[in-house]
Image (cartoon, coloured by chain):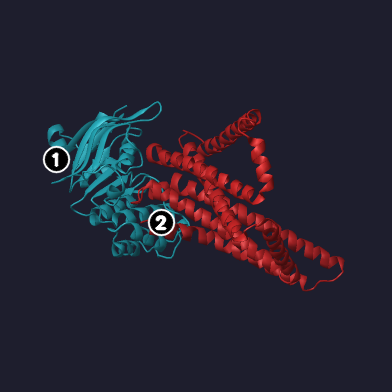
Chain colours: A red, B cyan
Amino acid sequence: MVKKLFKHEFYAYLRTMLPMHIILLGIALLGRFVQLFENDSTAYSIVFVSSVIVFIVGAIVCTVLTLVFGIRRFHTNLFSCEGYLSFTLPVTPTQHIWVKNIVAVIAQLVSLVTIALATCVITLGDVCNEIFKAFFYITKSMYAEIGFNTTLFTLEFIVFVVLAIATSYMLFYACIALGQRAKKNRIGAAIGVFFIYYFVMQILSTIGIIILAVFEQQLRLPELFSYLEKHPVTAVHLVFGVSAVVYVIGFTIFYLVTRSSIKNKLNLE
Amino acid sequence: MSEILRCENLTKKYTNTTALNKINLTLESGKIVGLLGPNGSGKTTLIKLINGLLTPTEGKIFVNGKTPGVETKCEVAYLPDNSYLNSWMTVKQIIDFFKDFYEDFREDVAYTMLNRLSITPDVKLKTLSKGNKEKVCLILVMSRNAKLYVLDEPIAGVDPAARDYVISTIINNYNPEATVLISTHLISDIEEVLDEAIFIQNGDILLQKSIDDIREENGKSVDELFREVFRW
């Protein structure tokens, strides 16, 4: 059943996302085509700047729409009228949540890859070569000077991005699932839950910073910072490691809230 | 006949309302049962509980001996009282969807019924009229070889000719060993096809009897008895 859920979920994304990605690549190709006519005229400058602006806006729209589609898909497919079909399929709420989250993360990653690919297309030639050269030069120098392992860093970065995207979606799912417990204006309630969460998190982080500042000697923070200053590679690993743990904890909490709401408090309109 | 549905002290409370109040109910296989009651009597709540769309506040519910879950969803075919299909899908895509998820789905039966209505498989659901959309929903549900069909207000809001179509589709396509539970308040239209009636009001079961017993004991049709019981 999970395979079938994946199949239909991917199809739902594909029919919306594929045209968007094709359009973005088309814009990039058109932008590159414009550059073939490079000259000093004002007309060229206007067309060139316009093509770059359209490309940047297209890339932003691609990312934002993928995020919005992922959130909307979760809400529409599970909590609107479509929920009557989704929740009467022989599938558990756990399977619904996981499939929706995994496909949303993959769609977001595909969007990022498309944007990177489109950037390569629009900068194809000297600019693209220079970007790659600069990237390899920086990573090579960092390895030579402080023993920075690019492969490990890249892997850590990918894990970080995947966890960040998955946790963000799960946060939205939890807000939607809690919002649907309201009697009226459930979307409004979900937005309310989201803002309350951020407000509470801001207060908690401020309290956390105050505690760290007050007890910095007892917690031996100056020693830690001085050690990390001397060992920047360790600092990077530590940042990724701590972030990963925080994301996993957040993901687990949001997942449990979502699952519990669907399992025990489902009430379709 | 085996038991397909059992409710034991089943209670569902919302914040300030008790939608179902400790109801006890048993349905046997092979019958067409009318779940009859005025608006707000608890019909849809009971149907949602059967389908696992709500969890009971108290008491238990068993579908074919199991609490609602993945297994019972394979055995229950449910028609909600609103349009619940992805409107961007074509009729063929939604049939493939049902075929993928329900092993008991009879594709040939679905296409035969669609053909009779002259609905082409490539047409998108959003381009269909409200009436045809409802008929497609009914066709999908009745194309399953389920053990329990739960139909929530299948004839509400449709013209008399369409009502006849809905009723004949139900009668001609359901699995004879299965039970069909039809919720409605338009009793005169379905009375002829019912084997049993359940009267529900304010979350309480007022009556559960066979249609023959109702007629014999009260000397009235189910419709007449309903009007008497639920008179304002």
Q: Tags 2 and 1 in contact by the CB under 8 Å rule?
A: no
Quarter of the image holding residue B34?
top left
Q: Residues within 10 Å of mark 1 (few under 14, many from 20)?
A: some
Horizontal relation, residue A52 to residue A42: left or right: left
Q: Chain of mark 2?
A: A
Question: Height in image: B220 above or below B148?
Answer: above
* Residue bearing the label numbered 1: B212
Q: Residue at x 36, y 46 (%)?
A: B80
Q: Nearer the viewer, residue B139 or B23?
A: B23
- Image quadrant holding the C terminus of chain A, namely top left
Inter-mark Cα distance, 2 to 1: 46 Å
| Residues flagged by tags 2 and 1 on a common chain | no
**Where residue B118 sits in the image (x, y, percent)?**
37, 64
Q: Residue at x 73, y 72 (%)?
A: A125
Q: Residue at x 67, y 49 (%)?
A: A232
- Residue B225 seen from this side: no
Question: Three-letter amino acid code at disc 2?
Answer: Leu
Q: Residue furthest bottom?
A: A36
**Where residue B191 sits in the image (x, y, percent)?**
23, 43
* Residue bearing the label numbered 2: A5
